[in-house]
Amino acid sequence: MNGPVQNAEYFDRIAHDWDNMMVLDGRAQAKVAESIAGLAINPGDFVLDAGCGTGVLFPHLLPQVGKAGKIIGCDVAPLMLEAAGKKHPSKRIELVCSDILEFLDSRAEASLGAVICFSAFPHFENKQKVIEGFYHVLAPGRRFLILHVSSSMELNEFHKTLQAPVNTHVLPDLSTLKVYAESAGFDVVRALDEPGLFMLFGEKPR
């Protein structure tokens, strides 16, 4: 089970250790930076970090959005967001404590410049609906990215070693995610699942 309440409780319990658990070596940092470049973020864009946790990606994203842009960090776990706010006190970061589907449904306009979901997608309950929500909030011609610095097999095997509810959380294979993305209306522009890297880019047609 990966309902929002169970997820919030789980990640709040490990919020104080999250940054130690998410230390990325130089090679992983390079993969993250290269992947973010593929989103083609423009200065002034508003970018959604879906499942932002403690803000691991914020240092990568802030230079991309520039002084006029903003990062919207959405996470279901309040203690993770509290840590993110302490680490990254910036007016260019808006932190939202919400289930991702509720947040996506609340957005009235298709105006975001990019959506990135790093090390979080397996924890979302209705994955197809989440991707449909990404389509709803993105401006035409803009992209979403699902990113992990491990393959789907590596990640799913690792999750099995963890406590409930995360031990049942699964990252779908690329073929499944491509179906979800294309059904939502996206063009899949790049997809990769190999040791040390999983990525899927979807672009909303203009």
Image (tube, rainbow, N blue to C red):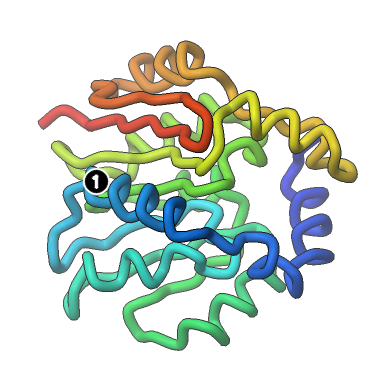
Residue 16 point in image, percent of width and height: 75, 74
- Is 38 above or below relative to 17? above
Residue 73 point in image, percent of width and height: 47, 64
For the point 62% across and 51% down, the residue is 99
Amino acid type, label 1: Leu
Q: Is mark 1 on a helix, strand or loop?
A: loop
Q: Quadrant of residue 83?
A: bottom right
Q: Which residue is identified by label 1?
A: 39
Residue 25 point in image, percent of width and height: 51, 59
For the point 73% across and 33% down, the residue is 169
Residue 96 point in image, percent of width and height: 52, 67
Which quadrant, please, contains the C terminus?
Answer: top left
Q: In which quarter of the image is residue 142?
A: top left
The outermost residue toward the right is: 163
**Is 93 placed left or right of 202 in the picture?**
right
Alpha-carbon neighbours of circle 1 within 10 Å: few (<14), some, or many (≥20)? many
- Foreground: 145 or 197? 197
